[in-house]
Amino acid sequence: MKSSAYLADHVARYTLAHTTPPDPLLEELAAETHALTGDNAGLQISPEQGPLLTMLTQLAGARNAVEVGTFTGYSSICIARGLAPGGRLTCFDISEEWTSIARRYWARAGLDDRVELRLGPAARNLAELPETETIDFAFIDADKGGYPTYYELILARLVPGGLIVVDNTLRRGRVAEAPAAGDDPIVRVTREFNDLVIADDRVTTVLLPFADGLTLIRKR
Ligand SMILES: C[S@@+](CC[C@H](N)C(=O)[O-])C[C@H]1O[C@@H](n2cnc3c(N)ncnc32)[C@H](O)[C@@H]1O
């Protein structure tokens, strides 16, 4: 998904031309993902989201990060590269097939020692994390109906000042249209999630019209 969803084409091109580009490894991963997964390659974050995730991880000074929704590993590499020295990223995904590609690229990126994968439903595996295991930074990019559960489980473990970044919160702007009976269920659950977050006084939040909507949530 390109940032152009909310920008004129020439502005989108300019923005991309002035954002740090992916390195050859990430480009190779994007190309292999396309070759191996076809249309599912659209699940991957867009190239301009990569450096933002790295920068946010760095700004958060994250030592303990989690990612819900890893796919073939693009966003996890961007996050892991931003971790503080000695930091760790725990990834949650249900697909052995897609994450086997991620594992190969973690090794090639030299991130094996920093990234751990928990395969299975994220709600179950997150709930198994001890509440004493604190989280500094989280990225949520999985099944949209699960977002409220992932949000609560992560927030309970998030340090004050910690950051949760949530992808696809605008659904190409459809969340902003008047609700109707025939709405796509994903649009409906995304609206519900956005409403839940803005009503939550435990956090401050910014919904950025970037890529397909990226919400930044900071625990007070
Ligand atoms: C949009 S993709 C993630 C893309 C990834 N962040 C990237 O940049 O490449 C969503 C991922 O969520 C995973 N997923 C879907 N339902 C899940 C669940 N209940 N628990 C854990 N992962 C799930 C899918 O297997 C898929 O890999």
Image (tube, rainbow, N blue to C red):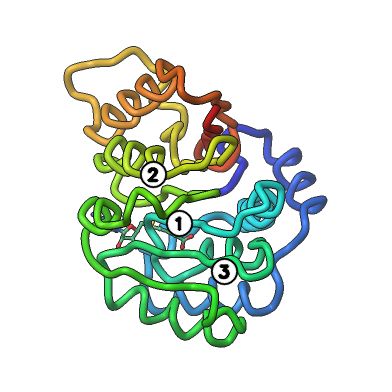
Few, some or many residues within 10 Å of mark 1 (<14, 14–19, 20+): many
* Disc 2 versus disc 3: nearer the observer: 2
Residue 187 left/right relative to 78: left
Tell me the number on the disc at residue 77. Answer: 3
Q: Tell me the crowding category of disc 2: few under 14, some 14 to 19, or many 20 or more residues within 10 angstroms, Cα based.
A: many
> In terms of image quadrants, where is residue 191?
top left
What percent of the width, then of the height, locates residue 152? 33, 36
Q: Nearer the viewer, residue 165 or 72?
A: 165
The kind of residue on which mark 2 rests is: Ile
Q: Is residue 122 left or right of residue 18?
A: left
Q: Earlier in the sequence, mark 2 or mark 1?
A: 1
Q: How far apart are labels 2 and 3 at the CA level?
A: 20 Å
Element carrying mark 1: strand
Residue at label 2?
154
Label 1 vs 3, first from the N-terminus: 1
Residue 157 falls in image quadrant:
top left
Q: Residue at x 62, y 70 (%)?
A: 86
Q: Residue at x 52, y 32 (%)?
A: 219
Q: In this rendering, is residue 13 above or below 66?
A: above
Asked which secondary structure carries label 2, the reply is helix
Q: Which mark is residue 113?
A: none
Point 55% across, 35% down: residue: 160
Residue 19 location (% of width, % of height): 77, 52
User: Under 8 Å from ligand 1: the CB of mark 2?
Assistant: no
Viewer-proximal residue among 116 and 31: 116
Residue at x-position 44% and y-position 57%:
67
Determine the CA span between mark 1 and mark 3: 12 Å
